[in-house]
Image: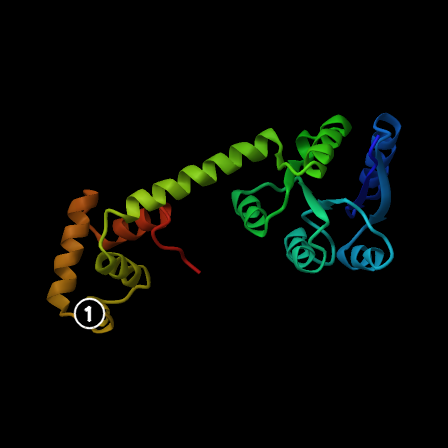
């Protein structure tokens, strides 16, 4: 039986102890070789401890799992990451996917058997996402697809005019930025209103924000 070595990074001691006890008693192929309650402790541990995989909580007292995951992919690329979190917003999931974590499970819907299944799957080179995380990933994909479809309805000039309106710029300043006349800006806005079936710049900006055409920083 191939042994899988794991480090748990979570600020809740009871959670760490519970995971260790449950997994090691029921899944002898998985060994917990280290624990850390924060990012600093974790990286100190890595100086003298090797592991196949880290169970990484997203919310930690000194940093967040997103920053830790970024650093691991640079400094410890062989260490696979299985993210754990009770905070599962689409933004968090999307950031972890962009970093390239191998798995993500919600703490709210995990148990030792699911964790063991996920650990084995990730160790074998597969990605593993809990059902609720998979639902979030599906929504992210649909939203991105919708953004691409909606954005293709507008010319580059129209998108830049929408962006200018979102910044509260008057037609004259948008015109100067695009090196066109204010009359042309108004003509483009009329075309945008017609495409969307709306009557005001505010409605246009709301639509653009909702569909990801523009983003407020």
Q: Is residue 150 left or right of residue 68?
A: left
Q: Quadrant of residue 115?
A: top right
Q: Residue at x 80, y 47 (%)?
A: 51
Q: Quadrant of residue 158?
A: bottom left
Q: How is the image coloured?
A: rainbow
Q: Residue at x 63, y 36 (%)?
A: 126
* Quadrant of the image containing the N terminus: top right
Q: Position of residue 217 (x, y in %)?
A: 44, 60
Q: Position of residue 72 (x, y in %)?
A: 69, 55
Q: Is residue 116 left or right of residue 28?
A: left
- Estimate how packed mark 1 is, as few (under 14), some (14 to 19) or many (20 or more) residues with alpha carbons within 10 Å: some
36 or 201: which is nearer to us? 36
Q: Is residue 138 left or right of residue 168?
A: right
Q: Is residue 141 left or right of residue 169?
A: right
In the rendered view, would you say 164 is above or below 56? below
Q: Residue at x 63, y 46 (%)?
A: 101
What residue is shown with label 1? 175
């Amino acid at each position: 039986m191939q042994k899988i070595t794991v480090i748990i990074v979570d600020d809740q001691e009871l959670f760490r102890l519970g995971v260790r006890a449950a997994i090691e008693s029921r899944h002898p192929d998985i060994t917990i070789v280290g624990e850390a309650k924060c990012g600093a402790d974790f990286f100190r541990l890595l100086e003298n401890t090797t592991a196949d995989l880290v169970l990484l909580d997203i919310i930690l007292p000194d940093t967040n799992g997103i920053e830790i995951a970024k650093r691991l992919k640079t400094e410890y690329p062989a260490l696979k990451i299985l993210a754990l979190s009770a905070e599962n917003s689409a933004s968090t999931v999307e950031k972890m996917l962009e970093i390239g974590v191998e798995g993500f499970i919600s703490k709210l819907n995990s148990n030792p058997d699911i964790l063991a299944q996920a650990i084995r799957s990730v160790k074998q080179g597969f990605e593993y996402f809990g059902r609720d995380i998979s639902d979030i990933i599906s929504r992210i994909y649909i939203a991105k697809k919708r953004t691409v479809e909606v954005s293709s309805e507008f010319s580059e000039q129209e998108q830049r005019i929408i962006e200018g309106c979102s910044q509260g710029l008057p037609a004259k300043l948008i015109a100067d930025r695009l090196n066109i006349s204010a009359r042309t800006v108004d003509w483009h806005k009329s075309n945008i209103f017609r495409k969307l079936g709306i009557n005001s710049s505010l409605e246009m900006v709301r639509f653009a924000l909702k569909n990801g055409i523009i983003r407020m920083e």
